[in-house]
Image (cartoon, grey):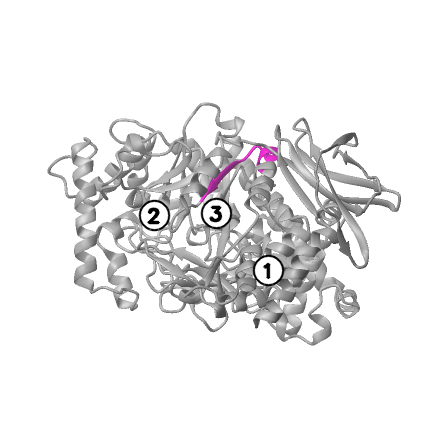
Amino acid sequence: MALSSPALRQLAEAFGIATEFWDWKGRLTEITDSTVIAILAGMDVDASDPEHAQQALDALWLRPWTRTLPPFTITEQGVERRVLVHVPHGTGVRVEVLLEDGGTVDVAQVEHVVEPRAVDGQLTGEAAFLLPGTLPLGYHRLLATTGAGQVEATLVVSPRFLGFPESMGEARVWGYSTQLYSLRSAGSWGFGDLVDLADLATWSATRQSAGFVLVNPLHAAEPTPPLEASPYLPMSRRYVNPLYVRPEAVPEYAELDDEDRARIATLKQDLEQRLAGSELLDRDQVWDAKIAALRIIFDHGLRPARQLAFDDFVRREGRGLSQFATWSALVIAEGANWREWPTELRDASSPEVAAFAADHVDDVRFHEWLQFAADEQLHAAHGTARSTGMRIGVMNDLAVGVSAKSAEAWTYSDLFADGLSVGAPPDHFNQAGQDWSQAPWRPDRLEELSYAPFRQMVAGILHNSGGIRVDHIMGLFRLWWIPEGMGPGRGSYVRYNHEALVGILALEAHRAGALVVGEDLGVVEPWVRGYLHDRGILGTSIAWFERDAAGQPLPPDSWREYCLASVTTHDLPPTAGYLAGDHIRLQHELGLLTESLDAELATAQAELSAFIDALRRGGFLAQDSTVVEDIVLALHRYLVATPSRVLCAALTDAVGERRTQNQPGTHLEYPNWRVPLAGPDGRPLLLEEVFTDARTFRLAAVMNEIGGSLDPAG
């Protein structure tokens, strides 16, 4: 049924809360009063009854009139944009732009006739000014000067079109995607690390002619066990998980005496013994051993020049790093969930938090140093990728959000909506819907903060990468908010200022010379893909989901040019497993299907048969071949036949792995994000074995459009 009161409907519209949506089966579904009221409450709006809803609405309409300038304005380069200014009625105002580089630009007033309003007993007028389309790219300031003084606000000018980075030229590029933690080497500590990433990039570039390596989010997790396994539920998206640091690659390791090196060697040997025979990755044990080793290195100290470099890193990172490091020390002292700490420690800016940091300065400094070490090793990995010939290099993944108990939620507690989480409505991936246990950013608070947290996060990720994949990029447009206790099916979409978020993303990528890929799978409003294309942001195309209006596999020449094209994704089993229907059987075992197993398998088999027929008709697969590896190679030949400029092959497909890394909609029911890379027989593979695996060279030959197969010894 429709919302019960006009004020509630208008509040929902004003705060971007959907009152209806089309579900994955094409049915129009209406949102209930209780859902909208709960979402508004999470944004500190009392709409519990019609009277309170009307009061909240009246205050909302008046809010712009209480400010001289809007807190944030964004425009595209080459586009004129009006800005509304509010001043006491009858008084004059001058508006100019203070450019990022130090110059100024006057802004002309344009005709705008609006009746003045009474605000706190004073008659207030509204004037309009037109920002010229000639403003340069960058982060500028709007300055309004009146008889009462001056007011400043943020102005961002973003590129109208991002497109492919200069490093790509007119060429097509392809690369591997990998879950870095699963990619272990003989030298890593039972867990893929940043040295492994550099080595993978070297091999991919020099022996496979790949142009990038796409990794899972490397975002920071908890500073003490138990560690969250999902890289998509981090504690901070701005900082890196030190679990990916290789202790022996820290420069200070070389300066340790024999006794300290022996202590670290013992830690590693003991870890290897404990992990021997384990079928799954064990983050907690790896962390305990590795953090002890890193502490030994930290306690050794830094020589003068290295100390200068560390101090400069801390200075450049500023308050964000010190707060993250303080949160890390507090978690160890007070527990994992900051919402359960003593009240005075829940405010990141409180005197008590400052006193704690002063009393634990060495621990705080250690966590700052961990980020210094991680930054250096990630920088080295990307540098290695570029120096060995990759056009893009390392491509980092940006998660949709963070845990409600995260460092970000503690640092910016007012930025997150209380009593709500982010997820997805029921869809083809998970017919019960999904709750991702992520705390949603409030659109109104983001605006008040001029999107600074988002800007800092994106800039930080692009500092050490040639590209960024934005997971669920639809989250820059709208997110599915779920009120606590209601379940995924009773949530609603909440809209964000996509012009601001996409504009900042494009500006930061332009400055970094980076590629941006948006993961636009699942339920996507049709206009969103068009908007992203018009802004030069790539989409994501997965072979299994690219179908025409009749439900048949989309012909290669009908694919998008502006997309990252691949056969599979981390939320599905590798192609060998998908061909076997492993994902259907797993969903059945976990109780995630709404249809019978036989019915789902029959549907999946019909879809696979249609695709294999298309491969044979197109000459990508021999008519009589039913060999799994032949079909995998044929699917990648299909990708190569598309106009897509960026192609991606999963490393799991290259080595013949079958097991999925993640089953959406599950937590402990399946070992999500804990499966080590293995071959078709299920035996775990070390990175050194990947380097000589003949399958990888056959796949690389396809991606490079080389006939036959490559000789790994050649």
Residue position marked by numbered label 3 in the rendering: 473
Dot 3 amino acid type: Ile
Dot 1 amino acid type: Ala
Q: CA distance from mark 2 to mark 1?
A: 31 Å
Disc 1 on helix, strand or loop?
Answer: helix
Q: Pointers 2 and 3 in contact (CB under 8 A)?
A: no
Disc 3 on helix, strand or loop?
Answer: helix
Q: Residues within 10 Å of mark 2 (few under 14, many from 20)?
A: many
The spot of residue 481 in percent (x, y) is 49, 61
- Mark drawn on residue 293: 1
Precedes in sequence: disc 2 or disc 3: 3
Residue segment shown in magenta: 509-518
Name the mark nearer the viewer: 2 or 1.
2
Precedes in sequence: disc 2 or disc 1: 1
Q: Relative to 44, say whether 706 is above or below.
A: above
Q: Nearer the viewer, residue 685 or 357?
A: 357
Disc 2 on helix, strand or loop?
Answer: helix
| Corner quadrant of residue 351 | bottom right
Q: Nearer the viewer, residue 133 or 279?
A: 133
Precedes in sequence: disc 1 or disc 3: 1
Q: Nearer the viewer, residue 259 or 699?
A: 699
The spot of residue 323 in percent (x, y) is 70, 59
Dot 2 amino acid type: Thr
Residue position marked by numbered label 2 in the rendering: 652
